[in-house]
Amino acid sequence: MGDAIRINTPVTSEQLKILKAGDSVLISGVIYTARDAAHKRLVQLMKEGKDLPVNLNGQIIYYVGPAPAKPGYAAGPAGPTTSGRMDPYTVPLLERGLKGMIGKGIRSAEVIEAMKKYGAVYFGAVGGAAALISRSIKKVEVVAFEDLGTEAIHRFYVEDFPAIVIIDSEGNNLYEIEPPKYRR
């Protein structure tokens, strides 16, 4: 990732505007983890008018449930899960200031429109590279919903976390842009 763009969290919509679908990035700073069950609880708290356990403003959520760490590592293998499972809960989180998501797979039209509206970016992490990804995770803390086990919300401190911009803040989608280049 020699030509990768380095970004540090938290981020703003203005900072994310330079990122285009297909760009390689290296993310450093804090990112949060959350999967289906945690997303459902976050949205339920919002519906009840309660405070969220994390301030999402300018943050990035990684859709992952990290495996237990081996000695000498902060996290075990940490590969992305399928992002579409979070789509029913994503728009309210974008409204709360969430600026980035890391996962794999396609997103709904509703989520993409909300990303354009709120200036957010969808990053892809490479499935099957979970052990390699875990090397960029330097510290892990559980910050909410500990009873969910690996699906609890974790705070990851990362250095040079490798990702690719799949959908940029203008809605350009790598899954739509790339396939026509390889058709004959």
Image (cartoon, grey):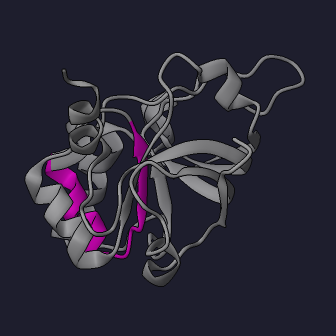
User: Is the residue 122 above or below the residue 104 in the image?
Assistant: below
Indicate left or right for 160 with 19 as reference: right
User: Is the residue 160 above or below the residue 94 in the image?
Assistant: above
Q: Residue furthest left?
A: 109
Magenta highlight on residue 97 = yes
Residue at figure coordinates x 59%, y 72% from the top left: 10
Give percent across and percent down for residue 165: 44, 51
Indicate left or right for 47 with 52 as reference: left
User: Is the residue 183 above or below the residue 152 in the image?
Assistant: above
Give percent across and percent down for residue 104: 36, 33
Image quadrant holding the C terminus, namely top left
Give percent across and percent down for residue 74: 78, 33
Image quadrant holding the N terminus, namely top right
Residue at figure coordinates x 28%, y 77% from the top left: 118
Magenta residues, start to end: 88-103
Q: Residue furthest right?
A: 72
> Does residue 86 show up?
yes
Give percent across and percent down for residue 39: 30, 48
Indicate left or right for 48 with 61 as reference: left
